[in-house]
Image (spheres, rainbow, N blue to C red):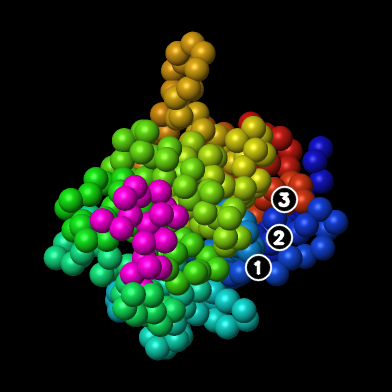
Amino acid sequence: MLNTPNANSAGAALFASQDVAGRRKRPVLTVNGLIVSFNGVAVLQGVDLAVDKGEAIGIVGESGCGKSVTWRAVLGLLPKSAKVMGEARLDGFNLVGAKSSVLDRVRGGRIAMIFQDPASALNPVHRIGAQISEALFLHRGLTGAAARAAARRLLDQVGIPDAQSRLNAYPHELSGGQNQRVMIAIALAGEPELLVADEPTTALDATVQAQILLLLKDIQRDTGMGLVMISHDLAAVAAVCDRVCVMYAGRLVEEAPTPTLLNTPQHPYTRDLIGAIPPSDGPRVRLTAIPGAPPHRVLPSGCAYAPRCRSADGACAMTRPDMRAISAKHVVRCIRVADGACQ
């Protein structure tokens, strides 16, 4: 039987923040006990995670599980109706509840975010060069010829051909993939320590998706920044990320290095997500559909996934599980993992 000591979520999130000698690294950002509610309905139940410098992590789960809300809460981008509690510490300073003047210096500067739809994120009446130059002025104080030269270098960096002439183009004159590259260039303008990419390949065809994923990985490696990739696509995350955090109903339910999570998933939800991915080669196999739907507004009294879980028993319906450490870098929120029953 595996030795599976209980671990609180905050500690579990930091298991991956160690080097090969076991020494603790200093994370770029640490999130502890993040809770978000709208009109009294909690959509995040207490999220704990950490991102190291130079590390790429993936946040995966079904729509509505809290992936995007987590990072919008960290950056203060939720509407006023949202109530946010907990901590998101950047160099020891808590961003949750910080003044707008403080967050304005962090957003786009130290932490940048790429949003899902570049068509709506880019201003259709301003040229590409002007939009990149605006970001360069806000975060690096560049103007005039210096800003234009830096904007051209950013377009070169993200792989847009004929960058000099593209500075004069409008968003509607570029393809979806090129607009996504422009969004990445704007995000890089502030030379961030952490880049959050929210569904960066949505609505792109498969070839362009692969190009954008490779671009993100190359930029992350070359600049040494941290990268957070939010996606419902485990295959896309696996291509880019060192570590994966699986979310369900506003909580992390499993966290592990990418190869470990893909080869030996422990939480039933993670296994069901992997079972729904069609194989890229070999014979055709029947995919595993996840029954039911995520909880809406009111969570079950026990494990949130119990109503949909094929391995659940009476204890699962009554006990709300904590994170358990099953190895130094692998944690899971399931009461049946210890005895191997959740297989």
Q: Residue furthest left?
A: 125
Disc 2 residue type?
Answer: Ser
Q: Is residue 11 left or right of residue 41?
A: right
SS assignment at label 1? strand
Residue at 77% across / 51% down in the picture? 328
Q: Is residue 151 magenta?
A: yes
Q: Is residue 287 visible?
A: yes
Q: Which residue is mark 3?
A: 329
Write down the quadrant of residue 264 in the picture.
top right
Q: Which tag, 3 or 1, sits closer to the chain's start?
A: 1
Q: Is residue 301 visible?
A: no
Q: Is residue 98 left or right of residue 130?
A: right
Between 236 and 123, the residue placed more toward the observer is 123
Q: Is residue 3 above or below residue 97?
A: above
Dot 2 surroundings within 10 Å: few (below 14), some, or many (20 or more)? some
Residue at 62% across / 56% down in the picture? 55
Q: Which residue is mark 2?
A: 17
Can you say which quadrant of the picture contains the C terminus? top right
Q: CB of mark 3 within 8 Å of CB of mark 2?
A: no
SS assignment at label 3? loop
Q: CA distance from mark 2 to mark 1?
A: 7 Å
Q: Is residue 219 magenta?
A: no
Write down the quadrant of residue 177 in the picture.
top left
Q: Is residue 289 left or right of residue 333?
A: left
Q: CB of mark 2 within 8 Å of CB of mark 1?
A: yes
Q: Which residue is mark 1?
A: 27
Q: Which tag, 3 or 2, sits closer to the chain's start?
A: 2
